Image (tube, rainbow, N blue to C red):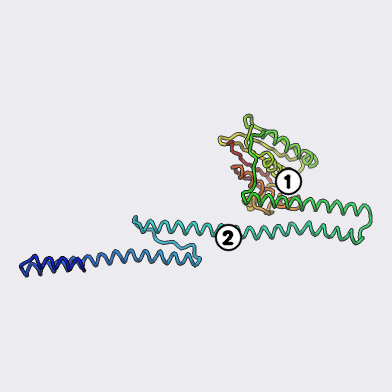
Amino acid sequence: ILTFLNVWVTARLMFASQHDLLLATVLLLFAGGIAVSVGYILSAALTDRIVTLNRAAEEIAQGDLGVRVPTAGNDEMAELARTFNKMAAQLEEADKNQRELDMLRRNLIAWAGHDLRTPLASIQAIVEALADGVVDEPQTVDRYLHTAQREIRSLSLLIDDLFELAQLEAGGLRLELQPNSLSDLISDTMESFSELASRQAVTLEGSVQPGVDPVRMDAQQIGRVLSNLLGNAVRHTPSGGVVKVKATAEQAGVRIEISDTGEGIRAEDLPHVFERFYRGEKSRSRATGGAGLGLAIAKGIVEAHGGRIGAKSAPGRGTRFFFTLPTT
């Protein structure tokens, strides 16, 4: 309006002819109408996109993290919409992870409570029987005491596993990384299971490719990984079966495989074997002394070294666990 008035007053002073002044006035009115129309269209389009963003932000504030806004165009508003959608996707992913974490925490408490309750109930029953004099025969008393010792040992191992798992998940596991002999570690681990393998008539075979050593690792922690995997393999391989441990060099590190000729793992259980307390697969059952934490701890240790771990199996055709360790 100010521009129109200024131009009209100036034209009135400049033009001596009334006709010229009238023509200038008509042209100014036409130009003003076009400018107002274009401005209204542009501002309406911009306002609509801002309103859409505002509504989407309100929906996110109310908990609907799946909302997204259109991103058509290449202007600043389109860039803002893309940034908004990226933020919404990150919030949705964080919310999903938080929900999964809460569910895992609840399951952990439930599973840990169940696994702690079982040996405690057994120990309580034994102690009460001995304290009340229900059992007085020396042989029975000795058997009861041995059972209590076994349950206490199982309870202690479970508590240690829970503590180590908590350290792994909190990133508090301290690794003493230094060059170590992987071949010696494999040999020592196989030797520790030789008696168990002999009792079950299971053959142990090991091989290390030349040039694998030395490997930069925490020997104690990797030894625990080998013990968990090798122990599982030996316990679930029938008489006459074979358990093999093999270490080979790769371009970016080393690969260790533990294979057996046991009963194998069902296809529906295989993706879950590294989950804490998972017992769908038989090698994770309490009957064999496991609490379902061994493979979860092994996975955490390997990943803390910067490696990866996996498993392949088929029912009746054995199981093959493998993990890798970087060379640097």
Residue 215, image x, y percentages:
63, 35
Residue 187, image x, y percentages:
72, 35
* Amino acid bearing label 2: Arg
Q: Which quarter of the image is occupied by the N terminus?
A: bottom left
Q: Which residue is mark 2?
A: 99
Which secondary structure, mark 2?
helix
Q: Residue at x 31, y 66 (%)?
A: 44
* Amino acid bearing label 1: His
Q: Residue at x 32, y 64 (%)?
A: 45
Q: Where 84 falls versus 318 (above or below)?
A: below
Residue 130, image x, y percentages:
89, 58
Q: Which residue is mark 1?
A: 236
What numbered label is drawn on residue 181? none
Residue 256 appears left or right of 158: left
Which secondary structure, mark 1?
loop
User: Which residue extends farthest left?
Assistant: 17
Q: Where 321 falls versus 50 (above or below)?
A: above
Residue 116 appears left or right of 105: right
